[in-house]
Amino acid sequence: MSRLRIAAWGAAIANALFLALEVAALAGGQTDWLPMWFVPFLVAAFLAPSVVGLLIANRQPRNVIAWIMLLGPLVLTVQTGLIVFGEGWVLQADRATWPLLYAWPIAIAFVFPNGRLLSRRWRRVVGLAIFSFAGFTAMASLDPSPFYGEDASVSNPLAGNTVGEALHVGWTAWILWVGMLASLFAGAYAIRLRLRRSTGIERLQTMWLAWALALVPIVLVLCFLSGLLGYTLGVTVIDWIVFPMLMGIWVATAAAIGIAITRHGLYAIEGLVNRTLVYVALTALLVSAYAAITIGLGVLVGGDSPWVIALATLVVAFAFRPLRARIQDLVNRRYRRARYEGVRLVRAFEDEVRDGLRAPEEVSAVVAEALGDQLAAIYFWLPETEAFADASGEIVDELPRYERSRRDIGRDDARTALLLHDPALLERRDLLDGVLAAAALSIEMARLRVEVRIQLAEVEASRTRIVEAGYEERRRLERDLHDGAQQRLVSLGVQLRRLQLKLPREAAVLSPAFDQVVDEVGAAIADLRQIAAGVRPARLDDGLLEALRELARSAPVKVEVEASAERAPASVEAAAYFVACEALTNAVKHGSPSKVAMRAIRENGTLHVSVVDDGVGGAVVRRGSGLAGLRDRVGALGGTLEIVSPRAGGTRVEVVIPCES
């Protein structure tokens, strides 16, 4: 075992012995400077830094942090050793050494976690801190002034000491006190710089220490208020809180260092630090307000009147919730800037969605921006098909396999989506968790909309397939009528005419009967042609343009036709033709127009059809009418049909049908 390890064990054993001596003195009644219920706090404060320092020294005997933690508890041993000399010496030691209770945590802040200062320039800061603490301790140890408060009856063993009176100058003590306070802020600044410069494991380690040292300011405030209340109103209740909390700083600092070195990723430290900062600031402000009200009103009315304490308590109770919310916002904005901005961005997006300015499906891009990862993407889970879909509603057969981390997103214990993100965000779980928690509702809304859109697309595709199947069936019927029954009737008529011509003269009396039968056959053929034309007009074989021209030629009014010769799918052309035919029929039958204009133009994969007349107008689409049926047919193809028909202003029928290029 090396000399340094032996020295570390010696320091730890010395701490344990001094602790045993202190406890024995308290238990034996040799001193009453601490009540017995303080003993557990004293034991924990002694053992925690000693044990952690010894563990570090065994692994890294040259690490400065280990020796700071081993020597820190020795501060209290000065008081322990002076027990045998009387209570006056204990109080004098307490007066001189209390700043050293904060010294070793501040020293840790300068060198944690690697045992080295941030730079050489920090040597001056450390030197100033050592001078301030050492100077104040030396000056206070020779202070000959009497004790105050409950200890005013105890005589100072150094009373009348001329050296102490010469050294103890009021303004000098205040300068040294300001120097110690400045070293506290310097330690906090050092922690802040390390947090800003460090990444990964070192950042998590530093955050553990930042969490523990966040308790220091509140204890300082309590110390100040304790002295202030003691001087003004004789209130000493805070004294019963200060010492346990001061010992708690030692335990928390030692525990934080131990966790940071061994299990730095065990807990969500960023959230713990955040809550600690919030409640430290909240406690300090509320205690300050309580003290200000108590002191202010106590001076006016005299003493510690019950109604003064009740009023102060009531004010603090009412201020707790709004003050906490405000401090939480300030802490998030200052110390969790990335998370704060990310959550703010997501909430602003939700407000825009609520106002109808943006679609929930844009949440993927918003989350990517909030996380600072432009390649981040959200894929929505479809439980019915057990597949993922993107924001556009496209089913994703296989997720990207490039180097991305996956994060399941759920709401109410149900899977809603999957986030693919930069693996570096795993070290910033506070940001990742905060943004996803804020975006959970928007993600669920987007998933539901995507799912509905996919279902509607399937319904529309199904309707289109039904229309296409019906149209193909009508074409088959038209071919069967034309090539089957119609041809047979034509052949039958021809055969009847041949039989009529071959009749002998004496059978001429039957000729009128044959003429009647042939006429009936001709009428049946005409009826079949009309039925076939209603199923699927043969005019469409040459395209929509020729079919509309043929329709215009057969109309009893002047019809102007403007159409492109570019072909469209057969079902689209048939729907457009039937719309034009129905609109023209209604115009002639009900509108009494002088002219009608038909237009059928294909633009950007869409067929635009319009039929405009200058008739009396006032057309209304009624249930069961021809236009109502055509609207359903056009809708089945994903199109729209609109009718504008003011009275005495003519009628305009417009159809828009998407068609493949």
Image: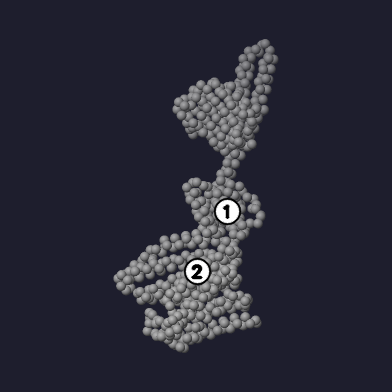
Q: Is residue 229 above or below residue 555?
A: below
What's the image's color scheme? one colour
Please report contact status of discs 2 and 1: CB closer than 8 Å, yes or no.
Answer: no
Q: Which mark is residue 185?
A: 2
Q: Between residue 563 and residue 326, name the one nearer to us.
A: 326
Q: Position of residue 495 (x, y in %)?
A: 68, 20
Q: Between residue 146 and residue 253, name the one nearer to us.
A: 146
| Residue 532 sits in quarter | top right
Find numbered disc 1 in the image and state the secondary structure of the residue it sits on. helix
Q: Can the viewer see residue 388 in this picture?
A: yes
| Residue 170 sits in quarter | bottom left
Q: Residue furthest left?
A: 301
* Quarter of the N terminus within the rendering: bottom right
Number of residues whose C-alpha sits closer than 10 Å to that of mark 2, classed few (under 14), some (14–19) or many (20 or more): some
Tell me if 312 is positioned left or right of 24 in this view.
left
Q: Between residue 145 and residue 336, name the one nearer to us.
A: 145
Q: Which mark is residue 521?
A: none
Q: Please tell me whether mark 2 or mark 1 is closer to you in this view.
A: 2
Q: Position of residue 50 (x, y in %)?
A: 55, 79
The amino acid type found where label 1 is placed reads: Ala
Q: Is residue 191 above or below residue 596?
A: below
Q: Is residue 359 above or below residue 308?
A: above
Q: Can the viewer see residue 87 in this picture?
A: no
Number of residues whose C-alpha sits closer than 10 Å to that of mark 1, classed few (under 14), some (14–19) or many (20 or more): many
Mark 2–mark 1 distance (CA, rounded to whole Å): 37 Å
The residue identified by callout 1 is 368
Query: Residue visible at 49% across and 28% down?
Result: 651
Query: Residue visible at 69% across and 15% down?
Result: 502
